[in-house]
Amino acid sequence: MSKKSYLDFKKTKSYRLMKSGDASFIFIQGGRGIGKTWSIMNNLVQEFIDNKRVIIKLCRNNYSIKPEAESCLEGVLPFFFPDYYTVIKTVGIFKFVYICKNKENPEDDDKPIHGWHIPCVAVVSLSAKNNLKSVSQSFNFIDRETKKHLPLSFYFDEYQTEDNKYLSDETESFLSVFSTINRERGDTWCIFTSN
Protein backbone atom coordinates (compact mmCIF):
# COMPACT_ATOMS: atom_id res chain seq x y z
CA MET A 1 0.00 0.00 0.00
CA SER A 2 1.45 3.33 -1.02
CA LYS A 3 1.72 6.18 1.44
CA LYS A 4 -0.51 9.14 0.53
CA SER A 5 1.31 12.42 0.16
CA TYR A 6 -0.05 15.82 1.12
CA LEU A 7 0.82 19.34 0.12
CA ASP A 8 3.39 20.98 2.37
CA PHE A 9 2.87 24.67 1.63
CA LYS A 10 6.22 25.66 3.18
CA LYS A 11 8.05 23.55 0.58
CA THR A 12 6.39 25.24 -2.41
CA LYS A 13 8.02 27.85 -4.59
CA SER A 14 4.92 30.01 -4.02
CA TYR A 15 5.61 30.11 -0.27
CA ARG A 16 9.27 31.02 -0.79
CA LEU A 17 8.28 33.82 -3.20
CA MET A 18 5.75 35.24 -0.73
CA LYS A 19 8.17 35.12 2.19
CA SER A 20 10.85 36.87 0.13
CA GLY A 21 8.42 39.58 -0.98
CA ASP A 22 8.71 38.61 -4.65
CA ALA A 23 5.06 37.59 -5.04
CA SER A 24 1.85 38.91 -3.56
CA PHE A 25 -0.78 36.88 -5.43
CA ILE A 26 -0.52 33.09 -5.41
CA PHE A 27 -2.88 30.67 -7.19
CA ILE A 28 -2.76 27.00 -6.19
CA GLN A 29 -4.79 24.32 -7.91
CA GLY A 30 -4.66 20.65 -7.03
CA GLY A 31 -6.72 17.55 -6.56
CA ARG A 32 -9.30 17.23 -3.83
CA GLY A 33 -7.90 15.86 -0.58
CA ILE A 34 -4.22 16.74 -1.02
CA GLY A 35 -4.31 19.11 1.96
CA LYS A 36 -4.22 22.54 0.31
CA THR A 37 -6.50 24.24 2.83
CA TRP A 38 -5.09 22.34 5.79
CA SER A 39 -1.45 23.11 4.98
CA ILE A 40 -2.06 26.74 4.05
CA MET A 41 -4.16 27.47 7.14
CA ASN A 42 -1.55 25.76 9.34
CA ASN A 43 1.15 28.05 7.94
CA LEU A 44 -1.03 31.16 8.10
CA VAL A 45 -1.94 30.51 11.74
CA GLN A 46 1.76 30.07 12.53
CA GLU A 47 2.45 33.40 10.76
CA PHE A 48 -0.26 34.98 12.92
CA ILE A 49 1.20 33.58 16.15
CA ASP A 50 4.78 34.52 15.24
CA ASN A 51 4.31 37.77 13.28
CA LYS A 52 0.73 38.97 13.95
CA ARG A 53 -0.13 38.45 10.24
CA VAL A 54 -3.96 38.64 10.22
CA ILE A 55 -5.82 36.21 7.94
CA ILE A 56 -8.64 37.70 5.85
CA LYS A 57 -10.69 34.63 4.90
CA LEU A 58 -12.76 35.41 1.83
CA CYS A 59 -16.01 33.75 0.87
CA ARG A 60 -18.39 34.53 -1.95
CA ASN A 61 -21.74 35.15 -0.23
CA ASN A 62 -22.99 36.56 3.07
CA TYR A 63 -24.65 33.29 4.08
CA SER A 64 -21.19 31.67 4.09
CA ILE A 65 -19.67 34.05 6.66
CA LYS A 66 -20.91 32.29 9.81
CA PRO A 67 -20.09 28.70 8.70
CA GLU A 68 -16.66 29.83 7.46
CA ALA A 69 -15.92 31.49 10.81
CA GLU A 70 -17.02 28.40 12.71
CA SER A 71 -15.01 25.96 10.60
CA CYS A 72 -11.94 27.84 9.30
CA LEU A 73 -9.67 26.69 12.15
CA GLU A 74 -11.39 23.51 13.32
CA GLY A 75 -9.22 21.23 11.17
CA VAL A 76 -5.98 23.02 12.02
CA LEU A 77 -5.99 23.87 15.74
CA PRO A 78 -6.41 20.31 17.12
CA PHE A 79 -3.54 18.95 15.02
CA PHE A 80 -0.99 21.76 14.99
CA PHE A 81 -2.05 24.05 17.84
CA PRO A 82 -3.77 21.88 20.48
CA ASP A 83 -3.12 24.44 23.22
CA TYR A 84 -5.47 26.97 21.56
CA TYR A 85 -9.21 27.41 21.13
CA THR A 86 -11.33 29.95 19.25
CA VAL A 87 -13.67 32.76 20.23
CA ILE A 88 -15.84 34.33 17.51
CA LYS A 89 -17.06 37.94 17.62
CA THR A 90 -19.40 39.72 15.20
CA VAL A 91 -18.46 43.03 13.57
CA GLY A 92 -21.34 44.25 11.41
CA ILE A 93 -22.18 41.22 9.30
CA PHE A 94 -18.60 39.95 9.45
CA LYS A 95 -16.97 37.56 11.91
CA PHE A 96 -13.64 37.91 13.71
CA VAL A 97 -12.06 34.68 14.99
CA TYR A 98 -9.64 35.03 17.90
CA ILE A 99 -7.37 32.30 19.20
CA CYS A 100 -6.80 31.96 22.92
CA LYS A 101 -4.50 29.75 24.96
CA ASN A 102 -6.28 26.97 26.80
CA LYS A 103 -7.10 28.19 30.28
CA GLU A 104 -5.54 26.59 33.31
CA ASN A 105 -8.44 27.88 35.36
CA PRO A 106 -11.90 27.58 33.69
CA GLU A 107 -13.00 30.69 35.61
CA ASP A 108 -10.45 32.86 33.78
CA ASP A 109 -11.67 35.19 31.04
CA ASP A 110 -10.89 34.49 27.41
CA LYS A 111 -7.63 36.24 26.45
CA PRO A 112 -6.66 36.23 22.76
CA ILE A 113 -2.94 35.80 22.28
CA HIS A 114 -2.44 39.22 20.67
CA GLY A 115 -5.37 40.99 22.33
CA TRP A 116 -8.96 41.74 21.32
CA HIS A 117 -7.82 44.32 18.75
CA ILE A 118 -6.08 41.65 16.58
CA PRO A 119 -8.14 38.69 15.38
CA CYS A 120 -6.43 35.65 13.91
CA VAL A 121 -9.06 35.48 11.14
CA ALA A 122 -11.54 38.02 9.78
CA VAL A 123 -14.19 36.38 7.59
CA VAL A 124 -15.50 38.64 4.82
CA SER A 125 -17.77 37.97 1.85
CA LEU A 126 -17.24 39.46 -1.58
CA SER A 127 -20.95 40.17 -1.92
CA ALA A 128 -20.80 42.44 1.14
CA LYS A 129 -18.41 44.95 -0.39
CA ASN A 130 -20.81 47.84 0.24
CA ASN A 131 -21.39 46.80 3.88
CA LEU A 132 -17.65 46.66 4.39
CA LYS A 133 -17.13 50.35 3.73
CA SER A 134 -19.28 51.31 6.75
CA VAL A 135 -17.15 49.19 9.13
CA SER A 136 -13.79 49.43 7.36
CA GLN A 137 -12.15 51.03 10.40
CA SER A 138 -12.66 47.67 12.19
CA PHE A 139 -10.13 46.18 9.76
CA ASN A 140 -7.46 48.76 10.57
CA PHE A 141 -5.25 46.33 12.48
CA ILE A 142 -2.43 48.20 14.24
CA ASP A 143 0.33 46.79 16.39
CA ARG A 144 0.01 48.79 19.61
CA GLU A 145 3.71 48.42 20.37
CA THR A 146 5.13 49.54 17.01
CA LYS A 147 2.14 51.70 15.95
CA LYS A 148 2.37 50.12 12.46
CA HIS A 149 -0.22 48.37 10.34
CA LEU A 150 -0.07 44.61 10.68
CA PRO A 151 0.63 42.45 7.63
CA LEU A 152 -2.35 40.66 6.06
CA SER A 153 -2.94 37.35 4.31
CA PHE A 154 -6.06 37.23 2.15
CA TYR A 155 -7.14 33.64 1.57
CA PHE A 156 -9.88 32.63 -0.88
CA ASP A 157 -10.41 28.86 -0.86
CA GLU A 158 -12.48 27.42 -3.73
CA TYR A 159 -12.16 30.58 -5.81
CA GLN A 160 -13.12 28.42 -8.80
CA THR A 161 -16.48 26.74 -8.34
CA GLU A 162 -17.42 23.31 -9.63
CA ASP A 163 -20.77 24.55 -10.92
CA ASN A 164 -19.35 27.73 -12.53
CA LYS A 165 -21.62 29.98 -10.45
CA TYR A 166 -19.96 33.26 -9.58
CA LEU A 167 -21.05 36.72 -8.53
CA SER A 168 -21.96 38.82 -11.55
CA ASP A 169 -19.25 41.30 -10.55
CA GLU A 170 -16.86 38.94 -8.77
CA THR A 171 -13.58 40.48 -9.93
CA GLU A 172 -14.75 44.00 -9.09
CA SER A 173 -16.07 42.78 -5.73
CA PHE A 174 -12.72 41.20 -4.87
CA LEU A 175 -10.82 44.35 -5.84
CA SER A 176 -13.19 46.50 -3.77
CA VAL A 177 -12.89 44.28 -0.68
CA PHE A 178 -9.13 43.99 -1.13
CA SER A 179 -8.55 47.74 -1.47
CA THR A 180 -10.96 48.63 1.36
CA ILE A 181 -9.18 46.34 3.84
CA ASN A 182 -5.62 46.45 2.54
CA ARG A 183 -5.36 50.25 2.21
CA GLU A 184 -2.11 49.98 0.22
CA ARG A 185 -0.15 48.09 2.86
CA GLY A 186 3.05 46.75 1.40
CA ASP A 187 3.34 43.36 3.06
CA THR A 188 0.15 41.63 1.91
CA TRP A 189 -0.30 38.10 0.61
CA CYS A 190 -3.26 36.88 -1.45
CA ILE A 191 -3.67 33.12 -1.75
CA PHE A 192 -6.31 31.54 -3.99
CA THR A 193 -6.89 27.78 -4.01
CA SER A 194 -9.22 25.44 -5.88
CA ASN A 195 -9.54 21.90 -7.18
Image (cartoon, rainbow, N blue to C red):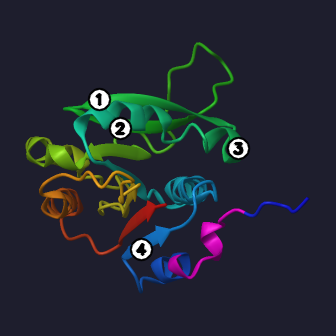
Disc 1, disc 2: CB below 8 Å?
yes
Q: Residue at x 12, y 57 (%)?
A: 169
Quick one: label 2 or label 4, which is nearer the N terminus? Answer: 4
On the picture, is 47 further left or further right than 129?
right
Q: Amino acid at mark 4?
A: Ile
Residue 174 spot, x, y in % from top left: 21, 60
Relative to 153, residue 108 above or below: above
Disc 2, disc 4: CB below 8 Å?
no
How many residues crowd around disc 3 within 10 Å: few (fewer than 14), some, or many (20 or more)? few
Quick one: label 2 or label 3, which is nearer the N terminus? Answer: 3
Q: Amino acid at mark 2?
A: Phe
Relative to 104, residue 168 above or below: below
Q: Residue furthest bottom?
A: 22
Which numbered dot is residue 96? Answer: 2
Q: Amino acid at mark 3?
A: Phe
Q: Residue at x 42, y 82 (%)?
A: 21
Q: Which residue carries the number 4 mark?
A: 26
Q: Which residue carries the number 1 mark?
A: 90
Along the viewing direction, whichever of 33 and 135 lies nearer the viewer: 33
Q: Residue at x 35, y 58 (%)?
A: 159
Image quadrant assignment for residue 177: bottom left
Q: Residue furthest front?
A: 163
Disc 2, disc 3: CB below 8 Å?
no
> Quick one: SS at disc 1?
strand
Q: Which residue carries the number 3 mark?
A: 79
Q: Residue furthest top?
A: 107
Quick one: label 1 or label 2, which is nearer the N terminus? Answer: 1
Which residue range is magenta in the image? 6-14
How many residues crowd around disc 2 within 10 Å: few (fewer than 14), some, or many (20 or more)? many
